[in-house]
Image: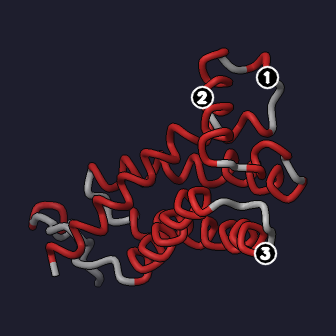
């Protein structure tokens, strides 16, 4: 069970690190003006749109702008917490993973419904989004079944001095 838990933690760490970088540098370009970003980041986003045929980022539909704000305000800080929590082996990382997983699963339901329901999405674009669906499921499972907690030393649970009651 330790191997599976470690593999899940590694996957969550990888995707959280991707979100840690992609949300403020790439996704936020949907919400903020272009002058706010370095030209190299604008070129990277343009390349991604052209390479994968991501018509959602190109057209910026209103639902996607709303989902991007959720990424910026909610998912990005939790991704920072996940990276720290997994690396520092904090017990609360199960909770942050559950929160991120449910939020991304909800967002991906809307995005995947659009991609699968329209005739615009190339297979390459679907292959780009599908791993995030799998990540959300793993993050939810991590939150529901956190695994063993780190061992606590005896010194941290030393009995405190109590007053005698008369």
Q: Where is residue 119 in the image (x, y as percent from the top left)?
A: 79, 67
Q: Distance between the residues labelled 3 and 1?
A: 30 Å
Q: Is residue 77 left or right of residue 93?
A: right
Q: What residue appears at the point 45 percent right and 70 percent down from the top-left corner?
A: 139
Circle 2 residue: 44
Circle 1 residue: 34
Q: Residues within 10 Å of mark 3 (few under 14, many from 20)?
A: few
Q: In this view, does 12 lie to the left or right of 105?
A: left
Q: Residues within 10 Å of mark 1 (few under 14, many from 20)?
A: few
Q: In this view, does 149 lie to the left or right of 93?
A: left
Nearer to the camera, 7 or 48: 48
Is 152 rendered above or below residue 69?
A: below
Quadrant location of residue 85? bottom left
Q: Are marks 3 and 1 in contact (CB under 8 Å)?
A: no
Q: Position of residue 26 (x, y in %)?
A: 63, 36
Q: Distance between the residues labelled 2 and 3?
A: 27 Å
Q: Is residue 82 left or right of residue 35?
A: left
Q: What element carries label 2?
A: helix
Return the residue found at the far left.
Answer: 154
Nearer to the camera, 61 or 47: 47
Residue 117 is labelled as 3
Q: What residue appears at the point 82 percent right and 49 percent down from the top-left corner?
A: 65
The C terminus appears in which quarter of the rendering? bottom left
First of labels 1, 2 by sequence position: 1
Give the number of the mark in front: 1 or 2.
2
């Amino acid at each position: 069970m330790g191997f599976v838990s470690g593999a899940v933690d590694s996957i969550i760490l990888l995707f959280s690190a991707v979100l840690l970088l992609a949300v403020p540098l790439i996704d936020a370009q949907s919400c903020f003006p272009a002058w706010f970003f370095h030209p190299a980041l604008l070129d990277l986003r343009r390349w991604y749109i052209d390479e994968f045929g991501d018509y959602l980022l190109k057209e910026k539909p209103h639902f996607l702008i709303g989902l991007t704000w959720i990424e910026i305000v909610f998912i990005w800080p939790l991704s920072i917490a996940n990276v720290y929590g997994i690396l520092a082996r904090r017990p609360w990382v199960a909770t942050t993973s559950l929160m991120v997983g449910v939020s991304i699963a909800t967002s991906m339901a809307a995005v995947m419904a659009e991609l699968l329901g329209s005739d615009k999405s190339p297979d390459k674009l679907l292959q780009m989004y599908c791993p995030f669906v799998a990540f959300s499921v793993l993050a939810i499972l991590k939150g529901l079944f956190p695994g063993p907690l780190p061992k606590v030393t005896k010194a941290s649970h030393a009995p405190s001095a109590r007053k005698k009651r008369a």
